[in-house]
Amino acid sequence: MDAILENVAGLQRDEATSYEVYRRLAAIEKDPANRDVLLRIAADEKHHYALLRARTGREVAPERRKVWLYMWLVRLLGLTFTVRRMEQDETASAEVYARYPDMADFVQMARDEERHEQDLIGMINEERLEYMGSVVLGLNDALVEFTGALAGFTLALGDSRLIALTGSITGIAAALSMASSEYLSTKSDNAPGKHPVKAAVYTGIAYVITVVALVLPFVLIPNALVALAVMLVAALLIITLFNYYYAVARRESFRRRFTEMAVLSFSVAGISFLIGYLLKAVTGIEA
């Protein structure tokens, strides 16, 4: 019985934490529809806390560190990512409540948690998600094209500073080209709610940020091969972080997207590295 009481106390803390997070998110949310859903879920969490308090007979404080983490997440990565991340905790709570089918209030709380999931799916109306396709285009194209280009430059040129200069010029030109293409594509599609200029800006910024991250090792490290290795690690880190964000925000498989992007980027890099070696051998040109 003591073990069950401790489990209930843990759930009570989770409900107190969720209530505090949803309450704070509602306070800073500008969209009225989103705010209403957040307040309704917060009220449910508060009700759940009261039911659990009646069983434990004690007050439990929210987990302040988790509240702080979620509030920073919403500032850094947006409401969509944050509530999807919380949704994963909601699903875990529902599974725990489902272990006690003989307790009627636990059964109702499990249903509430499942309803929260559906509410959260339908509530999101965030600009950065509407332009996620543009971000994917810029990021994916920069990773695939630029890891290959820098790998080829490494064998063809051999000098880190020259590679960084050539890569920067190529990257800026490619970013402008991609942004222009996205502008024309969005304008031609005439998609409702998607502005061509904003789509172009999202694509261009994603491309430039990726280029800077990939060129930086060649600026900082004199040895071109070591810089190439660091660049590939940076590319893998970018792929990991972005695909985790995308998988959570869009409820897609992280493993599938990560594998697809990583295989494409590193395959192109390997082929370009080989092409650079062959061209250097055939032409006999030394940097």
Image: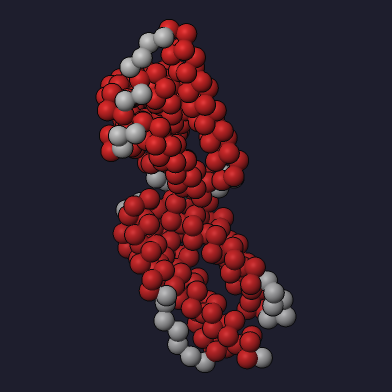
Q: Quadrant of the C terminus?
A: top left
In this image, 63 relative to 55: left or right? left
Where residue 99 appears, as percent x and y from the top left, is 69, 74
Where residue 243 appears, as percent x and y from the top left, is 49, 43
Residue placed most toward the observer, 199 or 195? 199
Q: Is residue 90 visible?
A: yes
Residue placed most toward the observer, 233 or 224? 224
Where residue 54 appears, as percent x and y from the top left, is 54, 88
Outermost residue toward the top in this view? 283
Count of marks placed on residues: 0
Can you say whether 283 is above or below 221 in the image?
Answer: above
Can you say whether 107 is above or below 140 in the image?
Answer: below
Residue placed most toward the observer, 134 or 123? 134
Tell me the residue at 38%/71% (across/down): 65
Tell me the residue at 31%/37% (across/down): 221
Residue placed most toward the observer, 211 or 107? 211
User: Which colouring convention does the figure follow?
Assistant: secondary structure
Tell me the residue at 48%/90% (across/down): 58
Determine which quarter of the picture holds residue 26: bottom left
Outermost residue toward the right in this view? 102
Can you say whether 63 is above or below 180 in the image?
Answer: below
Tell me the residue at 35%/20% (across/down): 157
Q: Quadrant of the N terminus?
A: bottom right
In this image, 128 relative to 255: left or right? left
Determine which quarter of the picture holds residue 109: bottom right
In this image, 180 relative to 119: left or right? left
Where residue 91 appears, as percent x and y from the top left, is 59, 63
Q: Is residue 180 visible?
A: no
